[in-house]
Image (cartoon, grey):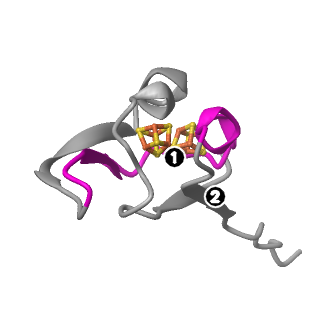
Amino acid sequence: MIKGTVLIATDICKGCELCVAACPQHCLTLSKQINTKGYRFAELKNEECTGCVNCALVCPDAAITVYRQAKIKKAV
Ligand code: SF4
Ligand code: SF4
C-alpha cells in the first residue's frame, strides 16, 4: 500500500471537518488546540494515510497538501 502524509495549514483551517468525514482511512481529527482565528484545526491522528487526496479535494480553503512516498523498487 502506498504511504502518504498530509501537511495542514493550520492557520487557514476553519475546523469544518469535511476532511475528517472524507478520509477513508480515518486519519484526521480536530485538534484540541485552536489556531489564530479561534478555530480547532484538523490534524493527522495516525499513520494510516495512503495519499488518496480526498481530504485535499473537499477542503474549501485548500488548507491541505498531500504527499506520497515514492515507490521503492526492489532489487531483483
Ligand atoms: S490523503 Fe486520503 S488517506 Fe490521507 S489523510 Fe487525506 S483523505 Fe485520509
Ligand atoms: S476541510 Fe479544510 S478547513 Fe475544513 S477542517 Fe479540514 S483542513 Fe480545515
- Report the residue marked by disc 1: 49
Side (left or right) of 6 relative to 70? left
Give me the C-alpha separation between circle 2 and circle 1.
9 Å
| Circle 2 SS class | strand
View extreme (bottom): residue: 75
Is the CB–ligand 1 distance for label 1 below 8 Å?
yes
Q: Is residue 43 magenta?
A: yes
Is residue 45 in view? no
Q: How would you rate the neighbour count of disc 1 (Cα within 10 Å): few for under 14, some for 14-19, many for 20 or more?
A: many
Q: Earlier in the sequence, mark 2 or mark 1?
A: 1
Q: How would you rate the neighbour count of disc 2 (Cα within 10 Å): few for under 14, some for 14-19, many for 20 or more?
A: some
Tell me which residue sits at (83%, 78%) in the image: 75
Tell me which residue sits at (25%, 40%) in the image: 30
Question: Where's the N terminus, which quadrant?
Answer: top right
Contact flag, marks 2 and 1 (Cβ < 8 Å) = yes
Residue 64's spot in the image, x, y percent? 56, 55
Residue 55 or residue 33, whichever sits in front: 33
- Report the residue marked by disc 2: 66
Residue 51's spot in the image, x, y percent? 65, 49
View extreme (right): residue: 76
